Amino acid sequence: MLQAVLDAMLARAIRHGRLAVEYPDGRIRRYGDGTGPEAGFRIGTRRAAWRLVASPGLSFGESYMSGEIEPADGHLIELLDLLMRNMHRRVTHPVEAARDLGRWSRRRVDQLNPAGRARRNVAHHYDLNGRLYALFLDRDRNYSCAYFRTGAETLEEAQAAKKRHIAAKLRLDRPPGAPPLEVLDIGCGWGGMALNLARDFGADVTGITLSREQLAECRRRAAEAGLSDTCRFELMDFREWTRPVDRIVSIGMFEHVGITHYRRFFRMIHQALRPDGVALVHAIGRSDGPGSTNPWLTKYIFPGGYSPALSEVLPAVERSGLWVTDIEILRLHYGLTLREWRRRFAANRDAIQSLYDERFCRMFEFYLAASEASFRHGGLINWQLQLTRDIETLPLTRDYMQETERSRTPA
């Protein structure tokens, strides 16, 4: 009975490609139309099979973590890529459809992120051993979507290009002899962007974070670079900021704000920007409209996190009084970024396992591979919003962005 139910579920879900599944009794069934990509997995226990029937969105990742599901030949990315190609936009499992509706109905409660809860959520993922991130990120520890002009760049080159791209949109054009522009970096990570703006653009930067591990590393890096006077870091929630600044940048933090707090976030930006100020918000989003966060991702990786569609963000911007002066959609860039992180994680797996354990390694492998597949086939994108308080703050065309980028790009 169990195998029949799971067999029917997979036959309904997998329409394209070739998926081979080995059940706990050793029998193998194949699904799909036999064309295109191929992948497979083995279900090692009846418990894992039952859990796939009851809650595939949560249990597939958990069963991989426990070793009860194993991809054929160890090729996890190929398996998740095939599954994502077939399942994007179609919730064909009746129980999963009901669970999805439940997640949708309570998502405002799930995403309530007052300051205390926001700190706990951030600590869950970002206060891990600092060596972990050094082992799979680029040398500057940028933990957000890179910017690939051709797709052939190294991760270091693409992350440097991302920082130039964002700096160009901030228009850091202070005349000679004028005081430096004051910049607020909301969710500053390990300080890469803030240090870049202070070192290469002469800005006076304050980065704020809720992660104690990131704060300590940011301050260490600023001191090591001799930039502690012009690049400062604070443990602070964005709602606590009150001082006016010339520029605001936020990269990969908005996903942790929560839909209940969008209006407050953009109202804070409006209040903090000086009249001629510019802000740039960079975040993960959805190309297919509002949704809910995968339950496995919520439980193990980003509690309280949500990647919004622009249709959920722009109404809050409009009510804040800010002008949206530019929107850019980065489609495949994060998929390419995650591919590089996944490869570096695999190359350093033994070192990472020495920091944690096998279960942690499998959790992180699943997170990186599933995220990569989602950006390739699951409708996830990155968006960048450029914002001002005044309609006349920026030039009439985008030429200044391209000119700034070209002037800062190494030959």
Image (spheres, helix red, strand yellow):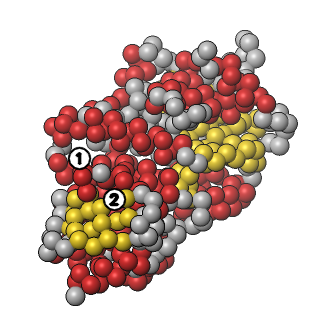
Tell me the kind of residue under disc 1.
Cys
Seen in the picture, residue 203 relative to 248 is either above or below; the reply is above
Q: Give the quarter of the figure containing the N terminus.
A: bottom left
* Quadrant where the C terminus is found in the figure: top right
Residue 310 position within the rendered picture, expressed as x and y whole percent measured from the top left: 64, 58
| Residue at horizontal 37 percent and vertical 59 percent from the top | 38
Residue 129 placement (x, y as % from top left): 26, 37
Is 296 or 183 nearer to us in this picture?
A: 296
Please name whichever residue, 104 or 221, is drawn nearer the observer in this view of the structure.
Answer: 104
What residue is drawn where x is 57% and y is 24%?
A: 197
Amino acid marked by disc 2: Ala
> Quick check: 264 above or below 102?
above
Of pointers 1 and 2, the one earlier in the residue sequence: 2
Figure disc tally: 2
Element under label 2?
Answer: strand
Q: Residue at x 30, y 66 (%)?
A: 20
> According to the image, label 2 marks what residue?
39
Q: Which mark is residue 208?
A: none
Residue 293 seen in this snapshot = no
- Residue beneath disc 1: 361
The residue furthest front is: 34
Residue 309, percent across and down? 59, 60
Question: Circle 1 sits in a helix, a strand or a loop, which is it?
Answer: helix
Up-down relation of residue 114 to residue 365 (above or below): below
Q: Residue furthest bottom?
A: 1
Mark 1 surroundings within 10 Å by alpha-carbon count, few (fewer than 14), some (14 through 19), many (20 or more): many
Residue 326 percent coordinates (x, y):
73, 44
